[in-house]
């Protein structure tokens, strides 16, 4: 079966996903060990794109083995290949190259792969600098790949991450009041989700729940002049900037105590 993306046709036969083009790619790259790393990742993204669109099924374990053969690490799969493919299927949906049903299935497969890749971080022993974080998406927020990638990146750094999907004003306040978190990270990919987040943050402030709130996501990259006032302590898509702010806030609270 062939999966088509643009002018590329990638083969995924009845056996391993490294059949056809993928197999030839591996042979070529392994024969030239000094090829630049980003070329391997780009090839890996193409193979992943073909795999998630394969109507015959999707096997995350086999795909992981195939990408490992390309010398692509699990970290690179999560940080680079999955986001690249998410953008591919998003562009194909916008340009009517993929149906909503196919995009939904592909998105679910990417999400499952991201979770599978992240299992190796689940049993890490937190260090002294570990933070307890609540990662939130707002009600009717359909984009789950970005938060899944962010969750993996945070756990990889040794932090404890809990997810709250489709949050409302009430559910967010209830969660923060019930459990203790060093920070709440809200991811928004649409203008509607951004407005929902702003309302939820206002409710958190009214309830005097003293938790640092960081707002991020693709929606904040839009025109800042049109962005509503959210009340977040920090607005950024830089994970290290967010963690620095959380560490600084935690230190301030400890000194105050």
Image: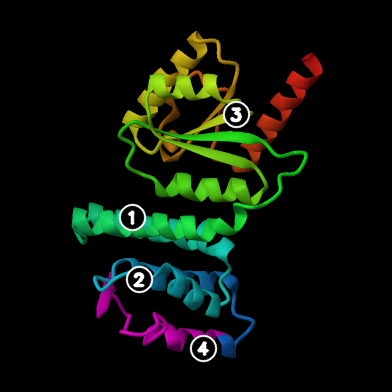
Whichever of labels 4 and 3 marks the residue nearer the N terminus, that label is: 4
* Numbered disc in front, either 1 or 4: 1
Which residue is pictured at 50% across the width and 18% down the height? Answer: 231
Q: Of marks 2 and 3, which one's residue comes earlier in the chain?
A: 2
**Crowd tier of the residue under label 2, counting other residues whose Cα lies within 10 Å: few below 14, some 14–19, many 20 or above:** many
Q: Nearer the viewer, mark 4 or mark 3?
A: 3
| Label 1 sits on residue | 107
Q: Earlier in the sequence, mark 3 or mark 1?
A: 1
Q: Is residue 76 visible?
A: yes
Label 3: how many Cα within 10 Å (few below 14, some 14–19, many 20+): many
**Label 2, label 3: how far apart the Cα atoms are:** 36 Å
Mark 1 falls on what kind of element?
helix
- Asked if the magenta segment contains residue 21, the reply would be yes
Q: Earlier in the sequence, mark 1 or mark 4?
A: 4
Residue corresponding to mark 4: 28
Magenta residues (range): 1-29
Q: Is residue 206 above or below residue 87?
A: above
Disc 4/disc 3 C-alpha distance (Å): 46 Å
Residue at (59%, 80%) from the top-left corner? 35
Disc 4 is placed on an element classified as: helix
The quadrant of the rendering that contains the C terminus is top right
Between marks 3 and 1, how big is the CA–CA gap? Answer: 28 Å
On the image, numbered disc 3 is attached to which residue? 183
Residue at mark 2 = 51
């Amino acid at each position: 079966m062939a999966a088509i993306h643009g002018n590329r046709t990638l083969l995924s036969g009845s056996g391993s996903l490294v059949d056809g083009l993928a197999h030839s790619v591996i042979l070529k790259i392994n024969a030239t060990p000094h090829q630049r790393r980003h070329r391997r990742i780009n090839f890996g993204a193409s193979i992943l794109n073909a795999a998630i669109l394969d109507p015959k099924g999707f096997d995350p374990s086999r795909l992981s083995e195939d990408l490992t053969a390309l010398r692509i690490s699990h970290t690179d799969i999560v940080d680079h290949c999955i986001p690249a493919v998410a953008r591919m299927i998003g562009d194909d949906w916008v340009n009517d190259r993929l149906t909503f049903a196919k995009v939904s299935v592909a998105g679910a497969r990417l999400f499952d792969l991201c979770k599978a890749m992240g299992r190796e971080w689940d049993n890490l022993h937190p260090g002294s600098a570990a933070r307890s974080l609540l990662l939130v998406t707002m009600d009717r927020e359909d984009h789950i790949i970005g938060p899944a990638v962010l969750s993996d990146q945070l756990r990889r750094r040794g932090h404890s991450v809990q997810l709250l999907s489709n949050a409302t004003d009430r559910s967010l306040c209830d969660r923060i009041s019930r459990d203790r978190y060093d920070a709440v990270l809200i991811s928004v990919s649409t203008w509607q989700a951004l407005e929902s987040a702003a309302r939820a943050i206002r409710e958190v402030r009214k309830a005097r729940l003293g938790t640092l709130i960081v707002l991020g996501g693709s929606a904040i990259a839009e025109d800042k002049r049109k962005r509503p006032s959210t009340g977040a302590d920090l607005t950024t898509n830089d994970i290290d900037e967010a963690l620095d702010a959380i560490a600084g806030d935690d230190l301030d609270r400890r000194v105050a105590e």
